[in-house]
Amino acid sequence: GQNIDQPTEMTATEGAIVQINCTYQTSGFNGLFWYQQHAGEAPTFLSYNVLDGLEEKGRFSSFLSRSKGYSYLLLKELQMKDSASYLCAVTDSNYQLIWGAGTKLIIKP
Amino acid sequence: IAGITQAPTSQILAAGRRMTLRCTQDMRHNAMYWYRQDLGLGLRLIHYSNTAGTTGKGEVPDGYSVSRANTDDFPLTLASAVPSQTSVYFCASSLTIGTGTGANVLTFGAGSRLTVL
């Protein structure tokens, strides 16, 4: 079966760095996405990785290792507004998105 | 403002009633999707459409139907609502499905919270 695993919840301190991991087992791979979802709101696109390596976008970076079926989202200089759920999703061989359940990130002052 | 509009924002519905959730996008995206989101579970695809005139079944299609008469609109219908359909429903769109710039990058509507009693 197809499966995306990510931690249910993480806590971090304002100004610190946090890494949210995602492991996947899917039938085929055509890219990995990270989305941010604030409570009560819609998910919004953060990043896309299709090749191995690190993609940096401001305070956020996303890493992919296809051989290990592994990705992480790195958030630097955490701000209170970063409190949200972070969703990992993989595009399978049919270009359908398989979603993880999301990681709720709690930022403490 | 370009984006996706969903209606209603929330609705309480008696079991057995018929309900249509509306979704309209103005980005001229080819692909559209309906997801449901339940606590502790990932987004689950109900139905999708690659382009106007075509639809496909997702992971959890039973009890739901869709139509795609034109590029902009993608309504979701619950023919006879049941309590297990209580959920938050998100409509989404992407430029296309497959390869190419913008493929599979989803833009979501604000969601419709549905409660079936």
Image (cartoon, rainbow, N blue to C red):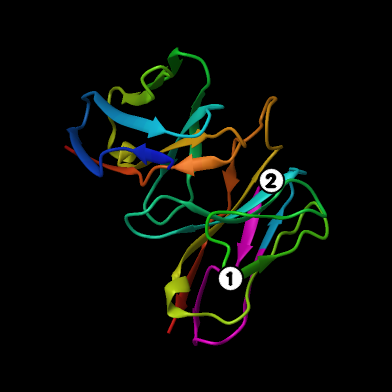
The residue positioned 36% from the left and 24% from the top of the image is A70
10 Å crowding of disc 2: few (<14), some (14-19), many (20+): few
Instruction: Give the residues in magenta.
Output: B1-22
| B58 w.r.t. A9: above or below | below
Report which quarter residue A37 is drawn in. top left
Which numbered circle lies on residue B51?
Answer: none
- Tags 2 and 1 both on a single chain: yes
Quadrant of image for the C terminus of chain A? top left
The residue positioned 39% from the left and 47% from the top of the image is A38
The residue positioned 77% from the left and 44% from the top of the image is B28
Q: How many marks?
A: 2
* Amino acid type, callout 1: Pro
The residue to which callout 1 is attached is B8
Residue A104, position in %: x, y?
28, 44
| B98 w.r.t. A102: above or below | above
Tell which subunit mark 1 falls on.
B
Is residue B14 part of the magenta span, yes or no?
yes
Tell which subunit mark 2 falls on.
B
Instruction: Check the image and name the residue furthest to the top.
Output: A53
Secondary structure of the residue carrying tag 1 is: loop
One can see residue A107 in this view = no
The residue to which callout 2 is attached is B2
Residue B10, position in %: x, y?
50, 72
